[in-house]
Image (spheres, helix red, strand yellow):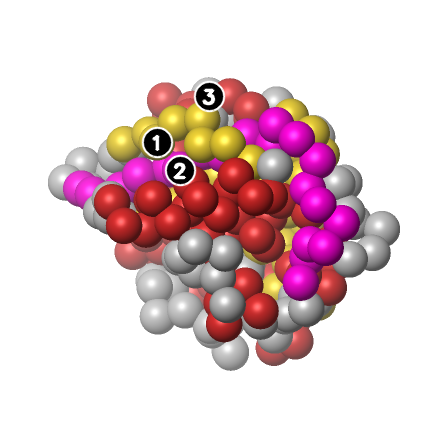
Amino acid sequence: MARYELPEGAAEKIDRLLAALAAEPDPPTTVRRPAEALTGHVADGLTGLEVAELRGAARIADVGAGSGFPGLVLAVALPGAQIDLVEATARKCAVIERLVESAGLENARAVPARAEEWAAGAAREAYEAVTARAVASLPVLAECAAPLLCEGGVLVAWKGARDQDEERAGDTAAGQLGLSLARVLKVTPFQGAHSRHLHVFTKTAATPDRFPRRPGMAAKRPLA
């Protein structure tokens, strides 16, 4: 963690976050023991700081937030940014809110909504960055993220081993949504980690008004 020059007090907040996750009575993740979560959630999430556009974003949406990662870790690392953890499952949102309170994160909140629903309202083009980890394929992520992003914003997608077919499909979908692949970064969150990549897409043009489609359509009828 030292390589990221985290702000003062970050280590204490991470300790509190890990303790709260370990004690959580309704955990939505099996990776919850502090030592495992430190690498599997915290170190993995911190790799997002290698994307300069994410580090500089004032508003970030973590879509399909699940158990709260990487959004909660980014909230610790970027205290000047507002982090909205967008999660459709009420149970998981309740867990996120408990973790937020336990860690003392004033810049993070759970948003109980589907990404498509959230983007269809006032949140459209409201974010400079969207993050997603272990949520869906690249074409689906691109469609969920594009309407939320302002022009010049970035989607940062955490992925494992590279898949040429998925990447081609992601590029095709991105082109229809106003996104363009900027780069793919190989990252090593902890010693011994392998096949971890961040796919970074930039919003280069307006997303057509027909997006977002209704919830579930991106997965049922992907653009590519």
Q: Are marks 1 and 2 in contact (CB under 8 Å)?
A: yes
Q: Position of residue 151 (x, y in %)?
A: 69, 29
How far from the left and from the top, in percent, is residue 159? 34, 47
User: In the rendered structure, which disc, 3 or 2, sits on the residue that comes first in sequence?
Assistant: 3
Question: Is 118 left or right of 160, judged from the image as shown?
Answer: right
Q: Is residue 193 visible?
A: yes
SS for callout 2: strand
How far apart are labels 1 and 3 at the CA level? 23 Å
Residue sticking out furthest to the right: 122
Above or below residue 37? Residue 164 is above
Q: Amino acid at mark 2?
A: His
Q: Which residue is mark 3?
A: 5
**Residue at the spot 61% in from the left edge and 74% down from the top edge:** 89
User: Which amino acid type is shown beneath numbered disc 1?
Assistant: Val
Q: Which residue is disc 2 drawn over? A: 199
Answer few, some or many: residues within 10 Å of disc 3's Cα (few below 14, many 20 plus, some between 14 and 19): few
Residue at the image position 31 percent from the left and 39 percent from the top: 197
Label 2: how many Cα within 10 Å (few below 14, some 14–19, many 20+): many
Q: Nearer the viewer, mark 1 or mark 3?
A: 1
Q: Quadrant of residue 134?
A: bottom left
Q: Which label was assigned to residue 172?
A: none
Q: Helix or strand or loop: what does disc 3 sit on?
A: loop
Q: Is residue 205 one of those drawn in magenta?
A: yes
- Left or right: 118 as drawn, with respect to 100: right
What residue is drawn where x is 73% and y is 64%? 117
In the rendered view, would you say 39 is above or below 92? Answer: above
